[in-house]
Image (cartoon, rainbow, N blue to C red):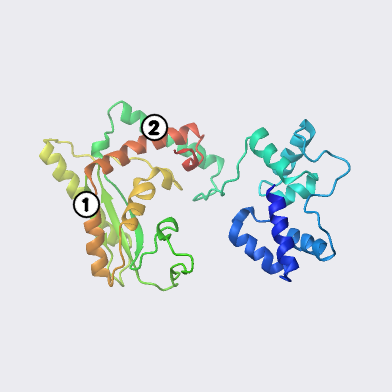
Amino acid sequence: MDNEYNRYYIKIRTIFGINPKTIHEELAIALGPNAPSYPTVTEWAKRFREGREDVNDDPRSGRPVSELTDENIELVREVITNDPHSTYDDIIAETFLSHGTIERIIHDCLQMKKITSQWVPHQLTDEQKQERVKLCRENLAKFRDGSYRLCDIKTGNETWIYHRQIHRKSTNASWVGEDESPTTIVRRGKFEPKNLFSVFFKSNSPVLIDAVDEGKTMDHNYYIENCLKPVVKEIWKQRKSAGTKEQHINIMSHPPYSPDLAPCDYWLNDYIKRNLTDQPDEKSLARVVSKVMKKIPKEEFKKTFDKLLERMELCINNHGDYFEDLIK
């Protein structure tokens, strides 16, 4: 039925002398990804200019066009298996089935839906997947036997933060009237001002927020003096207040190419950037970043570390592969 409505629209617009390109653009604006392809619009516009009245599909010889037969189901499955990015028009061209039949086969028989491809940080090798599983198992075992405790962990990472915030597309959506234009957002330029931050935190609060001054580089010496030494000092301070005499600091192993197992990457960096507003200079940006971190509720820090254990389990269950698509 959707095809018929689209063809009625193409027919009327063609009668008014509108060219196929404009008709296709109008349908694309109205229907988005469900709009018929440009070749389809061109073909039907040509038929209507030549005097065709009927908007229904021509009868096809050979395979049935509307039956949910095993043969048709396998035909559609084969097309999708060969090319998971196939469009409805591609499948119609390959199978000679109607749009409605293909839609029912895909959704009702094959139980499939089309989703956007998942971006992953790295193409993991088998060895890297095995290393991820191995380290997750080792770390979980230490948490379970009490060798590690979530309340003792200090974790951190570096992240670039721009002075001008763009945020995600979903948060930039706005309601507009019928004759109003949408608001515009300027893309970031190559040389827009930004600053490098190093942030560390524990299970209930921030530990360190360091903004690298403009013109400086975070090299080996800078990292030791401005990041590691203050964090170690915080560890001794925490142990002294708790009456702990242990002098050794354990370093928890972290697999390479694993931002999905790093609390800064899967939570904190994004949290900070989502709660920032535009800032005029680096000093203002540093103040606001510090303010945002210090206002994070203790429960959020705790939840993030609890999720670390869940993520280790997911990594093991997913045989070391990335698992963000499994998180509900």
Residue placed farthest to the right in the image? 61
In screen coordinates, is 239 left or right of 99?
left
Asked whether the viewer can see residue 77, the reply is: yes
Residue depicted at x 20% and y 53%: 230
Nearest to viewer (mark 2 / mark 1): 1
Q: Position of residue 278 (x, y in %)?
A: 31, 67
Which secondary structure, mark 1? loop
Q: Which residue is mark 2?
A: 138
* Vertical placement of residue 155 versus 64, above or below: below
Q: Position of residue 174 (x, y in %)?
A: 41, 61
In screen coordinates, is 302 left or right of 11?
left
Q: Which residue is mark 1?
A: 295
**Quadrant in the rendering for residue 31:** bottom right
Q: Position of residue 302 (x, y in %)?
A: 27, 39
User: Looking at the picture, which amino acid does disc 1 mark?
Assistant: Lys
Relative to the observer, which residue lies in front, 195 or 56? 56
* Vertical placement of residue 115 versus 64, above or below: below
Residue placed farthest to the top in the image? 145
**Between marks 2 and 1, how big is the CA–CA gap?**
34 Å
Residue depicted at x 41% and y 31%: 137
Q: Residues within 10 Å of mark 1 (few under 14, many from 20)?
A: few
Label 2 vs 1, first from the N-terminus: 2
Relative to the observer, which residue lies in front, 277 or 29? 29
Asked whether the viewer can see residue 225, the reply is: no
Q: Position of residue 322 (x, y in %)?
A: 49, 42
Total numbered circles: 2
